[in-house]
Image (cartoon, rainbow, N blue to C red):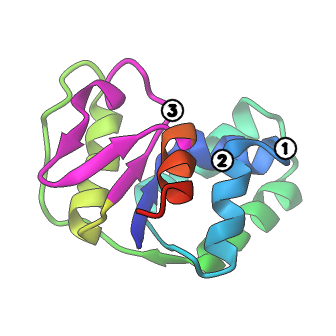
Amino acid sequence: MRIVLDTNVLISALAFPGSKPDQILSRIRRRASELFISPFILSELDRVLREKFRFTNKEVDVRVNAIRAIAHVITPIERITIVTANDDDNRILECAAAAQAEFLVTGDKEHLLPLGSYHGIKIVSPAQYLDLLTQGI
């Protein structure tokens, strides 16, 4: 299953062990799903871990490299402008579209989750994604 995790989900997975996002990341580590990320997501992940969570350079490098090691890094070509209130959300959609992902997992209740889907990509919360997995999607 091809998935993209929004930066906020990656942050939660790395900062809060045992959380639903961490459970998703564990499935990816076991190769139960294929994770796709973009240079934008990696850059945003790096920045937020440093600025908001005050992780040291070494802590950030370890975490970002761990994500890079289990993900396919792709560079989207298509430019998307569907979310007008927060252009960064368009970069996440671009990654999902370029990956031909089945799911975009996000905690963004304001801009991305209300879309529900984008060009066949289901946009769901971490809890919804885990629920779908238990239902055997």
Residue situated in front as seen by the camera: 15 or 107: 107
Q: Residue at x 40, y 62 (%)?
A: 137
Quarter assignment of residue 89: top left
Q: Earlier in the sequence, mark 1 or mark 2?
A: 2
Tags 2 and 3 touching, CB below 8 Å: yes
Mark 1 or 2: the one toward you:
2
Circle 1 SS class: loop
Q: Over which residues does the magenta segment extend?
A: 103-126
Q: Which residue is mark 1?
A: 55
Q: Earlier in the sequence, mark 1 or mark 3?
A: 1
Circle 2 SS class: helix
Left or right position of 18 against 13: right
Q: Is residue 137 visible?
A: yes
Residue situated in front as seen by the camera: 120 or 37: 120
Where residue 107 is drawn, which disc sits there? 3
Tags 1 and 3 touching, CB below 8 Å: no
Mark 1 or 3: the one toward you:
3
Q: Residue at x 61, y 71 (%)?
A: 28
Q: Earlier in the sequence, mark 2 or mark 3?
A: 2
Q: Residue at x 73, y 52 (%)?
A: 22
| Mark 3, other Cα within 10 Å: few <14 / some 14–19 / many ≥20 | many
Q: Residue at x 35, y 74 (%)?
A: 74
Left or right position of 18 against 21: right
Q: Which residue is mark 2?
A: 21
Circle 3 SS class: loop
Residue situated in front as seen by the camera: 14 or 2: 2
Left or right position of 18 against 107: right
